[in-house]
Structure formats: structure tokens, C-alpha cells
Image (cartoon, helix red, strand yellow):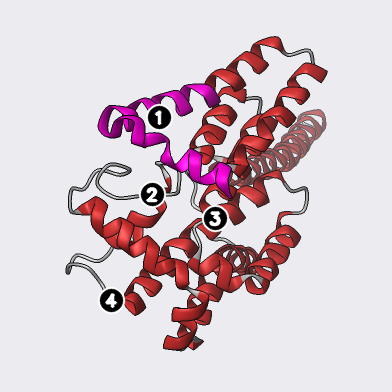
Amino acid sequence: MRGAGAESVNGCGGRSRIGADGGRRGRRALDTHVGQTTNDDSRGLEDAAARPGAVREPSVRTRVRRLRDVGLLVAPLAILIGVVGLASQRDVLIAGSDLRVYLTYADRLLSGSIPYLGFHLEYPPLALVAMATPRLLWPFGSPDLATFAWLFTIAQGGVAVVAGWLIAKVSPRPIGALGVWSLLVLAACISMAWRYDLWPAVLVLAAVVAAESDHPGAAGVALGVGTMMKLFPVVLVPILAARSIALRDGRGLARLLLGTTGVVVVVMAGSIAFAGGDAFQWVTYQLDR
């Protein structure tokens, strides 16, 4: 009996220790499961945030930077419009004397007259693009000189924005470069607002960007178009050609020259087809200056 009671007690005690150990092991397993679930949930949230489709709200600093960049980019347009807003009618007549010539050429072109044949033109053929574009912005017939000054300024401001974008692309410090560009626009605001020289200048910038991006053919096309607007972009052709030679890039040199000459030949061929020998009157004018 005594032995049986001891055995029974020992049996109960053994079962109690086993139950306690099992409870502790159960709690540890439960804690481990909960921890793994929490970690899995955290990783799931991180993975969801890292997925391409996840939407993240930009920070205030990011928004401020974007506003600053956009503001610097469109600053030339605002500067030119502000200057014209302050200009008097007398300023338009004196400083914007070329505007009357541009408006006359644009009106004659849009009325169906053939350049060089129907009217004298001392500029290359594609100069008419810069002169007629502002005129096309006005659908109410031929504008007066003051209205055309506004239209021309808006078009020039758009070109100045494109110029700033190109400058930022080639500059190691785009924000500083855009700031300097805005100051240059302010310093030369009258010339930039009322003369079309900014168009071929932007094409020169485009040629530089294309050459730096290893697209010599596109650079040649940009210089060809610029030359057919005003002659000075052709000066950059030998410079970029020398660069290709220095880099031993024969194919790049060929594409550059083909792009430039191809545009010039096509534009002049079209001009000759319409105006005959009179298509060269702008060349005579430039040589006589």
C-alpha cells in the first residue's frame, strides 16, 4: 500500500512537471508564432511600399523644390512679359522697329504671297517660321503693332523657356545655370523680346546637347535648321566637326555634315522651286552687308 501510494504520488508529480513544461513550451511557441506574424506583417508593409504601384505622397521639401525648379524655368517668360507690360507705345516703335518688318512679312506669307518672288526678303527662308508663328496666335486678322508686340513676346518667352531647359540639361549645376539664364534674359530683355535671334540660338544649344548625347546627326539637323533661319549657327559646324575628328569618330563626322547639308539643300531646293533664282536674294543681301 505504501509503495502504491508513493508510486501514485510520484505518478501525479511526474504528470504535473510534464504539464508545467508543456505549458511553458506552448507559451514560447505562441510567442514565436506571434513574433513571426508581426515580422511578416512588417515585411509585407515594406514590400507594399516598395512596389512600383505604391503611391507615396511627396514631402513638403520635395514640393518646394519642384516649385522652385518650375519657377526658374518659366522665369524668362515672366520677365519678358513684364518688360513689355511696362513698355510704352513709343518704346515699341523705337526699340521694336523690326517688329513692323516681321509683321509685314508674316501678313504677306499668310496671304499666299511667295517669299522672294512675291515680296523681298533679306532673311533665310526658315526665318519666316519665327515671324509667322506669333501672327498665327491671333485669329482675328492682322493685328496692330502693339498687339503683335505682345504676341511676339509670348512666342519669344516660350523659346526662352526651351533654352533654359537645354541649358539645364548640359550644366552640372542646373539650378545655378537657370538663375544665370534668367539674369541674362533680364539684361537683354528688349532684344530677346522683339528680335527673333533667340530661335537660331536655341537651335545651337540643341546641337550642343545632341552632340554631347552622341547624336551627331541630330546636331547637324539642328545646325542646318538654324542656318536656314539666320546664318550664324553655321559657325558651330567646323567646331563640332573638329570635335569628331579629335575623337576619331568618322561616322559621327559624316552624320554631322550630312545632317547640316541635307537640311540646307532641302530648304533651298524648295525655295528655288517656288521662287527660282530670286531665292538667293537673301544671300546677296547678307554678302552686301
Give the number of the disc on residue 197.
Answer: 3
Q: Is residue 130 left or right of residue 45?
A: left
Instruction: Residue 217 in the image: state x and y as whole percent.
Output: 56, 23
Query: Which residue is disc 1 drawn over?
Result: 268
Please name which of the two marks, 2 or 1, marks the residue nearer to the observer: 2
Q: Find the magenta span and give its range.
A: 260-289
Which mark is nearer the camera, 3 or 1? 1
Answer few, some or many: residues within 10 Å of disc 3's Cα (few below 14, many 20 plus, some between 14 and 19): some
Residue designated by label 2: 121
Q: Secondary structure at mark 3?
A: loop
Q: Give the mark nearest the N terminus, 3 or 4.
A: 4
Q: CA distance from mark 1 to mark 4?
A: 32 Å
Residue type, numbered disc 2: Leu
Looking at the rendered structure, the secondary structure element under dot 4 is loop
Where residue 33 appears, as percent x and y from the top left, is 63, 39
Query: Label 4 near label 3: C-beta < 8 Å?
Result: no
- Residue that appears at 75% across and 61% down: 176
